[in-house]
Image: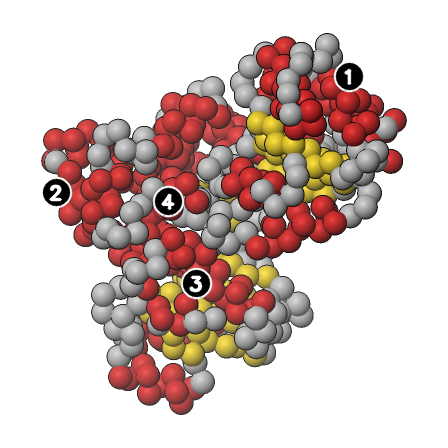
């Protein structure tokens, strides 16, 4: 299994505990939760039950068979109710450590809304003093956060740990493509993001072009219609959500712009966008250093594949159908550098975070992100691709990120120097440039003289 070392260590520490432990694991679909739990269950005797979208009786019957075959190596009959089933598990914990993993718990809870209360009663009156590790897992992030962990939930206060499984970053994602060049590893991440199921859909022995043709543009391939499929599984009105995601992927990142683009009221857009945020497909970002309620906030799609799919495939599906797969792929390839610009900024931010954790930055950032706003020196709008402040706000790292097919010229070096003037309160400023195609000789000479760091794609993989 690629990555997930921290997650596995966390689960292992819970297993080694000699008391009742109750872990909530959640994360968006396809992110690899089940794989992690299966890997963990393979190392220890575990009851692994995967709930399905069935009625309560059928789920209880399946659960009864799972636990009885675990303890008795045979199935007798379904327990008459959930209390009897949970009592049965609890009695066995008197003689051994019991690991009970329930995957897709929201399916069970939806079929029987009283199940959370039944489980709470079982924990309070029996399991809290037993040698049991209980893990409930779910892909419905909002349900797990609000209905299971929320303070109004019957289970509130019983949970001893929680873990949101996030997608891989660029460096972990690169492990799926060991023979790719640094550039192609980053492009694969830019297209697919860090979701393991999507990364596994690309053939690591095929080229980027070949994978785009076969896995993205071929009708019937898993990735061809995946975002639509997932939205239909998660949401009731995919048409409006589709429109919002398409608008954001094409540069409309403020509510007023999105509203105008899709011809819906701002209040309706806001409601739908909150839902997209709750399932981790959309997020609001503000300029680095500003409060979360800043009016300068913009919305971005969090998942690279959704960003890519809505920008290229969804918008142009009919056109690509007439153009043909090879020519459609050629258009996508030609626009990759432009598409990769914002993604490369995200990658460089992840790189700086990794450097900070390794103690390889001048300071550990207290705040880090993109900055945009008015530059008082230039008296016009300006931006910094990645900006990081220390806790006191008197030190800053300013990073310029270029994913282009030419060496970075002096003008762009000077652009970052001008942007640095927007922060007169910062006494120590460290400049970092990261360029796909290197730098002109003049930039190299000046950077050496002024102490700026010039990095290339190779540096991103040598932390």
Q: Which residue is mark 2?
A: 327
Indicate the position of residue 378 as horizontal and vertical percent values.
41, 68
Task: Name the mark nearer the viewer: 1 or 3.
Answer: 1
Indicate the position of residue 241 as horizontal and vertical percent values.
42, 28
* Left or right of 27, for residue 179: left
Q: Residues within 10 Å of mark 2 (few under 14, many from 20)?
A: few
In this rendering, the answer to whether 238 lies above or below 395 is above
Disc assigned to residue 348: 3
First-in-chain label (4 vs 1):
1
Identify the secondary structure beneath mark 1.
helix
Indicate the position of residue 459 as horizontal and vertical percent values.
40, 72
Give residue 220's quadrant in the image: top left
Q: Which residue is mark 4?
A: 200
Residue at image point 69% right, 24% down: 72
Estimate the spatial distance between the alpha carbons at disc 1 and disc 2, rounded to whole Å. 62 Å
First-in-chain label (1 vs 2):
1
Q: Coloured how? A: secondary structure
Identify the secondary structure beneath mark 4.
loop
First-in-chain label (4 vs 2):
4
Task: Name the mark nearer the viewer: 4 or 1.
Answer: 1
Q: Residues within 10 Å of mark 3 (few under 14, many from 20)?
A: many
Q: Residues within 10 Å of mark 1 (few under 14, many from 20)?
A: few
Residue at image point 31% right, 81% down: 443
Estimate the spatial distance between the alpha carbons at disc 4 and disc 3, rounded to whole Å. 23 Å
* Left or right of 68, for residue 169: left
Disc assigned to residue 84: 1
In this rendering, the answer to whether 462 lies above or below 304 is below
Estimate the spatial distance between the alpha carbons at disc 2 and disc 3, rounded to whole Å. 31 Å
Identify the secondary structure beneath mark 3.
helix
């Amino acid at each position: 299994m690629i990555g997930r070392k921290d997650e596995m260590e966390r689960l292992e520490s819970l297993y080694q505990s000699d008391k009742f432990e109750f872990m909530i694991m959640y994360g968006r679909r396809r992110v690899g939760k089940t794989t992690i739990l299966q890997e963990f269950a393979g190392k220890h005797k575990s009851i692994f039950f995967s709930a399905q979208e069935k009625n309560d009786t059928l789920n209880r019957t399946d659960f009864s068979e799972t636990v009885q075959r675990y303890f008795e190596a045979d199935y007798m009959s379904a327990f008459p109710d959930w209390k009897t089933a949970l009592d049965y598990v609890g009695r066995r914990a008197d003689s051994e450590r019991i690991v009970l993993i329930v995957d897709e718990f929201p399916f069970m809870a939806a079929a029987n809304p009283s199940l959370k209360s039944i489980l709470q009663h079982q924990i309070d009156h029996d399991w809290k003093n037993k040698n049991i590790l209980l893990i409930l897992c779910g892909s419905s992030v909002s349900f797990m956060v609000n209905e299971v962990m929320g303070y109004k939930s019957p289970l509130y206060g019983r949970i001893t740990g929680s873990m949101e499984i996030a997608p891989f970053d660029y460096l972990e994602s690169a492990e799926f493509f060991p023979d790719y060049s640094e550039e192609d590893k980053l492009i694969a991440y830019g297209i697919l993001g860090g979701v393991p199921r999507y990364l596994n859909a690309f053939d690591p022995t095929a080229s980027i072009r070949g994978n785009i043709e076969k896995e993205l543009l071929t009708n019937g391939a898993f990735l061809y219609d995946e975002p639509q499929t997932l939205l239909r599984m998660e949401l009731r009105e995919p048409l409006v959500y589709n429109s919002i995601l398409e608008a954001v992927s094409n540069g409309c990142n403020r509510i007023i712009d999105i509203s105008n683009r899709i011809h819906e009221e701002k209040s309706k857009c806001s409601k739908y966008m909150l839902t997209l945020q709750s399932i981790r497909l959309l997020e609001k970002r503000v300029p680095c250093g500003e409060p979360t309620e800043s009016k300068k906030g913009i919305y971005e799609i969090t998942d690279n594949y959704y960003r890519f799919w809505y920008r290229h495939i969804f918008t142009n599906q009919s056109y690509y159908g007439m153009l043909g797969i090879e020519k459609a792929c050629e258009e996508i390839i030609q626009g990759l550098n432009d598409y990769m610009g914002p993604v490369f900024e995200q990658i460089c931010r992840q790189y700086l975070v990794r450097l900070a954790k390794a103690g390889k930055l001048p300071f550990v950032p207290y705040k880090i992100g993109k900055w945009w706003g008015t530059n008082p020196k230039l008296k016009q709008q300006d931006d910094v691709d990645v900006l990081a402040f220390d806790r006191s706000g008197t030190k800053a790292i300013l990073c310029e990120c270029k994913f282009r097919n030419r060496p970075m010229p002096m003008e762009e070096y000077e652009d970052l120097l001008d942007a640095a003037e927007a922060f007169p309160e910062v006494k120590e400023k460290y400049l970092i440039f990261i360029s796909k195609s290197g730098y002109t000789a003049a930039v190299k000479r000046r950077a050496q003289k002024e102490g700026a760091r010039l990095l290339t794609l190779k540096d991103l993989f040598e932390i």
